[in-house]
Image (cartoon, grey):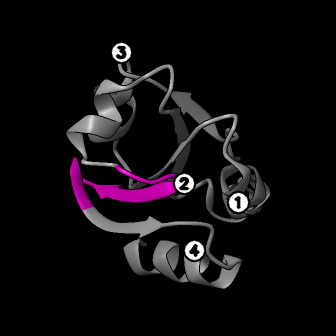
Amino acid sequence: MTQGVLDVDDTNFESQILKADKPALVDFWAPWCGPCKAIAPVITELEKAYGDRIIFARCNVDTSPNTPTQYSIRAIPTLILFQNGKVVDQIVGAVPKSHLEEAVKKIL
């Protein structure tokens, strides 16, 4: 059973993502960002397909500025794949679903 796309912020990023017992894909986004809105439904689709094996989360860069700064995020959307608390892949921009699905499959 999947849990849906999790909202994370500066206060819970470490506990929810870095210390998680499974890999995580985090979408760094903002409400005013057009490409972020375009990619959000794709992430929801992937969460429904793979959410039992990987955490799907999103972090609003406007309300949680420390976490994006820590990962040197300069453009959004930026999607980062984490495994065992470490960055294993990073995708910048609104990319096709097939590209994201390939990255997810690689980490599983």
Q: Label 3: which residue?
A: 11
Foreground mark, 4 or 2, reads 2
Checking the image for residue 77, the label placed there is 2
Mark linked to residue 100:
4
Residue 80 occupies which quadrant of the picture? bottom left
* Along the line of sight, the residue nearer the viewer: 24 or 96: 96
Disc number at residue 39? 1
Relative to 34, is 62 above or below?
above
Q: Can residue 53 be seen in this view?
A: yes
103, above or below 43, in the image: below
Callouts 2 and 3 close, C-beta under 8 Å: no
Determine contact: label 2, label 1, CB under 8 Å. Answer: yes
Quadrant location, the C terminus: bottom left
Looking at the image, do the residues carrying marks 4 and 2 touch, with CB atoms under 8 Å apart? no
The dot on residue 26 is none
Lower position in the chain sequence, tag 2 or tag 1:
1
Judging from the image, what secondary structure is the residue with disc 2 in? loop
Q: Is mark 4 on a helix, strand or loop?
A: helix
